[in-house]
Amino acid sequence: IAGITQAPTSQILAAGRRMTLRCTQDMRHNAMYWYRQDLGLGLRLIHYSNTAGTTGKGEVPDGYSVSRANTDDFPLTLASAVPSQTSVYFCASSYRDTGEQFFGPGTRLTVL
Amino acid sequence: GQNIDQPTEMTATEGAIVQINCTYQTSGFNGLFWYQQHAGEAPTFLSYNVLDGLEEKGRFSSFLSRSKGYSYLLLKELQMKDSASYLCAVRDSNYQLIWGAGTKLIIKP
């Protein structure tokens, strides 16, 4: 693994289904983030984790949950998907103090 | 509330210079970032300003005025590959990034 990876690349999901988006980084960054990006809007923070074992809510957390069991992995779960969760999801990581965030390639999610 | 404003779209000619402006109102300030994002790809880091003044990095420069809540990204000697969206983001008092909606830059030959 080089950098930060996400899976799947894209997914079409029926409304009401549960879905987990995966994110893994090998840079030993202590902070990780989940964003969604919608046309005409800036990146919006869903959840973040400043260090393994801790998580926090961002600007748009409703309908999403995260966990941070170790430094490398930061999965995002949609418990019961709704069409308004159709978006491109980016995972990012950083050393907390420097703040420069490195982004994964993104997951394009469509909820029908 | 927190707000980052940047133009939605700009057009420039190959070989020319373009300036993309960003104004911000945030709860606290711990630095301003510029990212480049090509269509269908992830954002990639371009520059970081935390003190007033100009930071130069090759063909790209970024300027910050904290008193005016203002930054710009200057791109010189434009190339077709510079066609992308440019995202302005401010790190607030909670050390979270607040993002603008991005400026789509179209380069014409």
Image: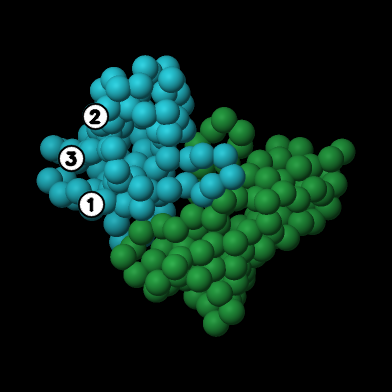
Under tag 1, what secondary structure? Answer: strand
Q: Quadrant of residue B60?
A: bottom right
The amino acid beneath tag 1 is Gly
| Residue in the image at 85% along x and 47% along y | B13
Q: Of marks 3 and 1, which one's residue comes earlier in the chain?
A: 1
The amino acid beneath tag 2 is Ala
Q: Of marks 3 and 2, which one's residue comes earlier in the chain?
A: 3
Relative to A102, B33 lies left or right: right
Task: Tell which subunit mark 1 falls on.
Answer: A
Distance from Cα at disc 3 to Cα at disc 2? 17 Å
Residue nearest the observer in this picture, A89 or B52: A89
Q: Which residue is mark 1?
A: A56
- Circle 2 packing at 10 Å, graded few (<14), some (14-19), many (20+), is some
Q: Quadrant of the C terminus of chain A?
A: top left
Residue A37 at what x, y percent from top left? 48, 40
- Circle 3 packing at 10 Å, graded few (<14), some (14-19), many (20+), is some
Q: Which residue is mark 2?
A: A79
Q: Colour of chain B?
A: green
Residue A73 at what x, y percent from top left? 23, 34
Specify whether disc 3 shares its chain with disc 2. yes
Distance from Cα at disc 3 to Cα at disc 1? 11 Å
Relative to A74, B37 lies left or right: right
Distance from Cα at disc 2 to Cα at disc 1? 17 Å
Which mark is drawn over residue A68? 3
Task: Tell which subunit mark 3 falls on.
Answer: A
Chain appearing in cyan on the rendered image: A
Residue B9 at what x, y percent from top left? 72, 49
Task: Tell which subunit mark 2 falls on.
Answer: A
| Residue in the image at 36% along x and 59% along y | B96
Under tag 3, what secondary structure? Answer: loop
Q: Of marks 2 and 1, which one's residue comes earlier in the chain?
A: 1
Residue B31 at what x, y percent from top left? 45, 67
